[in-house]
Structure formats: C-alpha cells, structure tokens
Image (tube, rainbow, N blue to C red):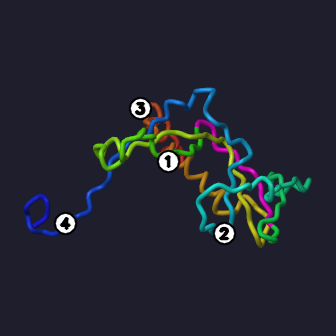
Amino acid sequence: MDRDGNGQGSCAMGAFGSVDLSRFNDSTAVDLKGQVHQLPCCIKYDGPSSVSHYFKPKSTGIEVDGLKMEEAYFRGRKLQGTTVHLPQGYSGFVIGKKSLGKRKASDQPEEISNSWEMKAKFQSITFWNHDSLPSQNDAFVRSFHWLTVTKALHQSVTPEDLESASNSQQAK
C-alpha cells in the first residue's frame, strides 16, 4: 500500500523548500557582472579554481546580428561568445543551502534543511560556441523569447482588449 492506503502504488512526493531572496536589493549582495559564462562543455569538477588566471575573454571588435563577439580559449580550444543581457524585469541568482550553523543537517527539520539563500546575482550571461559564431538563431538566445510569450499568455485580458480584437476580426 502507498501512503494514502489505496494500494495503487507509490508516487514520489515532491520536495518542498524555500529560497530567501531578501538580499536581492541589498548592496552587499555579490554582483557577478561579466563573470557568468555558459560553456559548450561539461566540467566534472566542483570546487575552487583560479579561472580568471587561465580563462581570459577578449573583444574581437566584430559584431554579428547585433551581437558583439568575444574570443577565449579553454583547455586550448578556441571559443567564440557574446554577452546577453537578461530581459527587463528579470535577474539571475546563484543560490546555496542556508547555513545551519554548527548543528548537523540531520538534526534539523526537513523544512529548515531544504532552505536556500541568494549568494550572488547577475544581469547578463556570456554564452560560448566552439564551432560557430554566436547568433540570434542560437537556442540559448531564442530561449529568452519564451519569456515574452509567457508574459503575453498570463497577462490579464480586459473587456476593451476583447472588444478591440472582436472589431478587428469583423473588419476583415
């Protein structure tokens, strides 16, 4: 029997948690301007590294599709990238588990141990391609168009909007 007692099998229950963004407008929040990169590879390492010592992007002076090109090398491979600003009204965050002090995570209730807080914020991302110049047709850039679509889908429709749409349909 599952936890509901109906014998139908068990569904995994979703995890609940909280994210504390209270430092969002705080001037002490770390701003990662120019430091957020989306690389075309998988790095199987999670720890400190002197990235800025080895990874040094440079402007090429070339502009394609309104995007200013940059160039960098990562492990001897040439990367071509551009910086994309997040749309108006959106921000990026780096979040991490809330510090639990000296108490063990296992001693905390699940709600507390699944609490997150903002560690840093950013307003732009530099994305990199290996085999081609970045363009407006890259999936990464196109994904931002969905934010406009979702805003339109979730925007309230007023009676005036309906009347206007109805009148334009009748005029055709």
Three-letter amino acid code at the position of disc 3: Pro
Q: Quadrant of residue 98?
A: top left
Compute the Cα span from label 1 to label 3.
21 Å
- The vertical placement of 124 against 42, above or below, is above
What residue type is disc 4 on? Ser
In primary-sequence order, the first of circles 1 and 2 is 2
Question: Which one is earlier in the sequence, the residue at label 4 or at label 3?
Answer: 4
Q: Nearer the viewer, residue 135 or 9?
A: 9
**Is residue 107 or residue 56 the one in the foreground?**
107
> Residue 74 vs residue 11: left or right?
right
Q: Which residue is mark 4?
A: 10
Q: Residue furthest front?
A: 102
Q: Residue at x 23, y 64 (%)?
A: 11
Q: Which label lies toward us, 1 or 3?
A: 1
The disc labelled 2 sits on which kind of residue? Answer: Cys
Counting residues from the start of the chain, the first of labels 1 and 3 encountered is 1
Image quarter where the N terminus lies is: bottom left
Amino acid type at mark 1: Thr
Q: Earlier in the sequence, mark 2 or mark 3?
A: 2
Circle 3 is placed at which residue position? 159
Residue at horizontal 66 percent and vertical 69 percent from the top: 41
Location of residue 136 with respect to 88 vertically, above or below: below
Residue at numbered disc 2:
41
* Viewer-nearest of discs 1 and 4: 4
Q: Earlier in the sequence, mark 1 or mark 4?
A: 4
Q: CA distance from mark 4 to mark 2?
A: 37 Å
In front: label 2 or label 3: 2
Judged by depth in the image, the label closer to the viewer, 4 or 3, is 4
Residue 163, horizontal then vertical, whole percent: 45, 35
**Magenta-tinted stretch:** 79-89
